[in-house]
Amino acid sequence: MEDETLMGTGNWLSIISTLLILLCFYFSLTFFQHLKLGDERLIKQSKLAAVFCLALSLLIPALYSLYVYNEMMK
């Protein structure tokens, strides 16, 4: 039963990770748009949002794989 739960969680986390990568791409595009317009506040906000989404999308699967590895070693 626990293996099925872990597999279901892994699927949901991969969907969330993919959505965060898409959001990162969106915020990167808006960053370039605001850079062209010269709005400093929106440049900073979109850059921070893109970096935050990318960091989460890369950290979530890594942390989950460490969790699964530790659970299998018990």
Image (cartoon, helix red, strand yellow):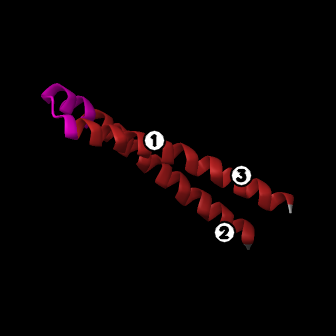
Residue with the mark numbered 1: 54
- Residue sitting farthest toward the right: 74
**Disc on the earlier residue, 2 or 3:** 2
Residue with the mark numbered 3: 66
Q: Are marks 2 and 1 in contact (CB under 8 Å)?
A: no
**Helix, strand or loop at mark 1:** helix
Residue with the mark numbered 2: 5
Principal secondary structure, stretch drawn in magenta: helix
Residue 12, position in %: x, y?
53, 60
Q: Is residue 14 left or right of residue 5?
A: left
Q: Are marks 2 and 3 in contact (CB under 8 Å)?
A: no
The N terminus sits in image quarter? bottom right
**Disc on the earlier residue, 3 or 1:** 1
**Residue, x 77% and y 54% (percent of image)?**
69
Range of the magenta residues?
A: 30-41
| Crowdedness near tag 3: few (<14), some (14–19) or many (≥20) residues, C-alpha within 10 Å | few
Mark 2 or mark 1, which is nearer to you? Answer: 1
Tell me the CA gap for discs 3 and 1: 19 Å
